Image (cartoon, rainbow, N blue to C red):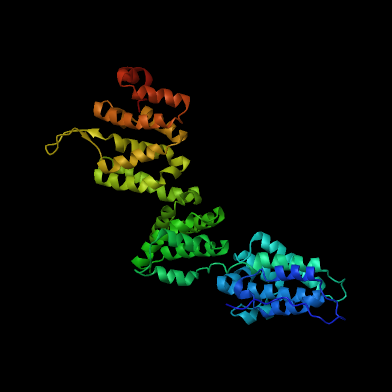
């Protein structure tokens, strides 16, 4: 353990010395630093000049200790990130580069931006920097008093010299290399900790790197799987602007019309829950073919199951001009038809695989989608023919009850749904509530 330096009051009577009370104040404050900082030569210099009221020199020496500490913490935190934030004339690669290419103002700003200094520490270190520039940099300035020196020492100790080194920031390229391995630990806590302390600029870069890598043709299954694990964790800590940027990148991929890349990009967007950040035109390009395919696949149970599964994560983001056809297609699919089979004892036929997905889609309906359901029941001639059968009407009522329970339907829609779902008033529903179909 390094021996603490002590403030020694020298004896020569001709020197203007600190009083015992002043010496006690300085001694108490000056060593209120981390243990490993106590043998810093700059602090030693301050200790030498303070007993004889060398306040200018003490301010300069103490500020040098702060600058040294900030440089070391920045190197520990991330030189790469510091370079990105400050953009110095020359890339900072080692300690000595700070001396030639980074002024104190940029040092403080960079330390703040990469998480070495807090917002409050940044403000007070700029004040300390101004104090040093005024009294140590300009000899013709008025003489600083002991209170001025003690205030500077106190702030520098509290916000810098007593503070431990911050956690190191992951290097993105190195981290991606780690992810491209079966040995990468899929530990939610560890991954969250690696991402949560990242400054905004690193999160932006990492989110874009993950998207680019995931959409690449040359990606290993290990890396793809690890991105699928990590991306949602990172996404939860991104700003709305970062999320919008990824959405815009996918919109651009849509325009390039590379179907394989679009499929991979959509996989990423659905993985992180980013559909709200892509524009309506992109959604239409993705969703319209699925709706059309579901319409064409009516009563093809296996295909209906596949398409319903693909539509479910998109259901909350259906463009307005596709909403009616979407609701009609999934309603028809869910209701099914009455038939007979020598292989099955059942008479109600529908896609079991599609049914659970459609129920969940109905649970996410808004009032506009509910209105589309009511309109479908009123106007779809195929559906009207099918619900004349009790089994198909009961299945339609399941969907109606889901919408009733959501309590978001308009008054007119609620009246219609209540009539539909009232099993004791079936005849009245068909004769008085359902409108007559127009003849073609």
Q: Nearer the viewer, residue 68 or 92?
A: 68
Residue 245 x, y percent position in the rendering: 53, 57
Q: Residue furthest left?
A: 342
Instruction: Relative to 378, say whether 32 is above or below.
Output: below
**Residue pictured at 25% horizontal, 26% vertical:** 390
**Residue 259 position in % (x across, y down):** 39, 59
| Residue at 49 percent of width and 69 percent of height | 172
Which quadrant: the N terminus? bottom right
At 31% across and 36% down in the image, what residue appears? 332
**Position of 107 relative to 298 (above/below):** below
Looking at the image, can residue 434 be seen? no
Quarter of the picture holding the C terminus:
top left
In this rendered view, identify the residue nearer to me: 47 or 55: 47
User: Residue 84's quadrant in the figure?
Assistant: bottom right
How far from the left and from the top, in percent, is residue 87? 64, 72
User: How many numbered discs sit on the rendered protein?
Assistant: 0
Q: Quadrant of residue 202?
A: bottom right
**422 up-or-down from 166: above or below:** above
Dividing the picture into quarters, in which one does residue 177 lie? bottom left
> For this view, does 182 lie left or right of residue 139?
left
Q: Say whether residue 330 is visible.
A: yes
> Looking at this view, is 228 or 255 the one in front?
228
Q: Classify residue 197 as left or right of residue 340.
A: right
Q: Is residue 22 above or below residue 391?
A: below
């Amino acid at each position: 353990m390094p021996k603490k330096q002590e403030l020694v009051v020298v004896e020569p009577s001709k020197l203007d010395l600190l009083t015992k009370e002043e010496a006690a104040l300085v001694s108490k404050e000056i060593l209120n630093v981390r243990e490993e900082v106590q043998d810093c030569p700059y602090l030693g210099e301050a200790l030498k000049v303070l007993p004889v009221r060398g306040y200018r020199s003490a301010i300069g020496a103490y500020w040098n200790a702060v600058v040294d500490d900030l440089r070391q913490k920045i190197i520990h935190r991330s030189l790469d990130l510091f370079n990105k934030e400050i953009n110095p004339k020359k890339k900072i690669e080692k300690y000595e580069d700070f001396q030639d290419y980074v002024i104190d103002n940029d040092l403080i700003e960079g330390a703040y931006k990469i998480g070495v200094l807090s917002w409050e520490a940044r403000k007070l270190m700029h004040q300390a920097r101004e104090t040093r520039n005024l009294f140590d940099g300009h000899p013709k300035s008025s003489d600083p008093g002991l209170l001025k020196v003690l205030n500077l020492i106190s702030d520098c100790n509290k916000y810098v010299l007593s503070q431990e080194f911050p956690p190191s920031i992951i290097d993105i390229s190195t981290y991606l290399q780690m992810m491209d391995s079966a040995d990468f630990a899929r530990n939610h806590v560890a991954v969250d900790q690696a991402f949560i302390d990242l400054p905004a600029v690193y999160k932006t870069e990492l989110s874009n790197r993950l998207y680019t890598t995931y959409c690449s043709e040359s990606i290993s299954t290990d890396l793809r799987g690890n991105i699928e694990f990590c991306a949602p964790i990172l996404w939860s800590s991104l700003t709305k602007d970062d999320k919008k940027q990824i959405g815009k990148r996918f919109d651009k991929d849509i325009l390039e019309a590379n179907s394989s890349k679009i499929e991979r990009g959509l996989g990423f967007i659905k993985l992180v829950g980013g559909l709200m950040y892509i524009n309506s035109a992109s959604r239409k390009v993705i969703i319209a073919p699925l709706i059309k395919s579901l319409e064409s696949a009516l009563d093809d149970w296996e295909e209906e199951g596949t398409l319903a599964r693909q539509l479910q994560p998109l259901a909350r983001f259906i463009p307005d001009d596709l909403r009616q056809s979407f609701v009609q297609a999934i309603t028809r699919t869910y209701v099914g038809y009455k038939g007979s089979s020598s292989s099955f004892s059942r008479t109600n036929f529908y896609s079991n695989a599609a049914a659970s997905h459609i129920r969940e889609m109905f649970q996410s309906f808004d009032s506009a989608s509910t209105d589309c359901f009511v309109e479908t029941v009123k106007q779809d001639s195929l559906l009207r023919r099918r619900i004349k059968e009790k089994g198909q009407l009961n299945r339609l009522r399941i969907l109606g009850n889901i919408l009733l329970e959501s309590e978001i339907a308009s008054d007119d829609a609620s009246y219609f749904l209540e009539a539909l779902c009232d099993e004791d008033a079936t005849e009245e529903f068909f004769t008085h509530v359902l409108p007559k179909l127009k003849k073609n």
